Amino acid sequence: MRQASSDTIAELYLAHKDMVYRVCLRFRRGDPEWAADRMQEVFLRLAERWDQLPEMDSPKAFIYRTTMNVCINQVRREQNLVTLLNRFFHKEPSVYTAGGTDFVQPEKAASDAQWLERLDGALATLPVKQRVVVIMYYLEDVDIPEIGRILHLNKGSVSRRLKAARKQLAMFFGEPAPEKD
Amino acid sequence: MTTPLERARAAHQEVRTPAALDQRVIAALRAPHRRGARFASWWVPAVTSPLVLLLWFVLRTPLTPIRPVLPAVADAGPTEVAEAPVERESWSAADRLPEPQINHVTLWGPGETGIQSLLDETVSYGVFSGVQVSLRSDFATIDKRSEQHVVMLAGHLDWNVRYLETAQLTIEVLGVIYEVSPGRFSLQVQPNQVQLDVRQGQVVVRTPREPARTVVAGSRFVARAAVTPPPRVRWTRAELERRLEAFSKAQQHEQAAVFIRSVVPQVSGALRESLLVDLAAIYGQYLHDWDRACATLSWATREFPAGTLSEGIAHLRDRYRCP
């Protein structure tokens, strides 16, 4: 394997790190440690597959896809164990909901944490396939054709998953999630 | 009207990566060995099982004694042992420098020039044509003008210069020219003098009034009268605010930071403190470089322990989660 240029990876890292980190946070109820581990995994995969990068359509799409795959695989891996333990101990997983490190006033940070907690609670109830498209469509503003291209799905599948997710989100937000398109 | 989902999305999009995580991931990316299995797990039994069977088959058969057959020792006399050929490491300007540590900063990449400041015990690498320079400083401002010419504007710098190919690096400090050889030395700029301490190697010094002289390891050179500090621009707060506002309007935050770094050595007192806070805020808020933001805040705290902006500095330190 050609040694990847860490400078160029560092550039990609700087450009996309915030997106990867916050997507990973939303996947696992805002758990910062979990998100940090997944983020590291994503960029290590990027470094390992550096040779394939020139053939890729866009590094951003690759990073999105890798992020989603890494998170989905880890969530599924844990789900079996967590479900088993929850049945045994009758205990729900805790909500972490980490905010950002950016420059927010304390009042705003508290308000943000409240909204993120609600959002994480809603996302945790969705199956991972729906969670992926909701995060990309509603939180990262990626449109449906682009989601299909990134996840190798057709538009119909993406729309169906979004439609199913909207009903679930409405229970948490008190109103149906808007259709943007 | 903002829907709950839009508010949650706004909160989500403000999430930023913690600085400590940046360091961790970049260190992992720079590590030579990547973690992760190279072979699928089913390869392990597939490869080891035949080997174990083969080993078992060999060991169960009785081993015949081995008789060593040694050639007679001839009286050949002393033998000359040739040294293995030493291959010299080739280097070109396109090659990368040795990987710096995580707290190291690369000041100029290949072909880059311009003014840079070093803060807070930073160890930095500079790339010149054929010359590798590592710098350590509490505070210094230096201007790389070409691949062979660097001008030190202010501060105190420890230099460690290594030539990778035939080249010539000239350092100019307040009008005194230093033609440097590989080695270590420090340069300190004070109001009316420049002082050179050579710890290893030698440096040839030329002043406008004196002929060239060589300063060797263990000796010190102080240039006084010959030194004429460059004329200083008298910056006023209004002028600085006007300039910074122009940078801000043009969204030229990187240029604003370079500008402030070049002005800081020329001002003092409250204006200097205020500029340091501005610089830290630009690093943190616009450039998302929290390491430099924290280093700048440490510098401001050290210089102005009871300054008028100390409360604001403490607030920024909290906000950027400075150690």
Image: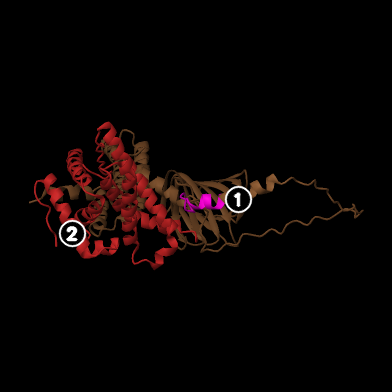
Q: Disc 2 designates what residue? A: A160
Q: Which mark is residue B51?
A: 1
Q: Is residue A158 left or right of residue B76?
A: left
- Across and down, in percent, residue A21 comes to 31, 49
Q: Is residue B87 magenta?
A: no
Q: Colour of chain B?
A: brown
Which of the pair B168/A41 is nearer the observer? A41
- Quadrant for residue A92, please give it: top left
B246, B26: nearer the viewer? B26
Give the colour chain A carries in the figure.
red
Q: Secondary structure at mark 2?
A: helix
The outermost residue toward the left is B1
Callout 1: chain: B
Q: What residue sits 56% from the left and 47% below the top? A: B185
Asked which quadrant contains residue A64, the reply is: bottom left
Q: Which mark is residue B224?
A: none
Q: Position of residue B21 (x, y in %)?
A: 36, 45
Is disc 1 placed on a helix, strand or loop? helix
Amino acid type at mark 1: Leu
Tell me which segment is drawn in magenta.
Answer: B35-48
* C-alpha gap between disc 1 and disc 2: 52 Å
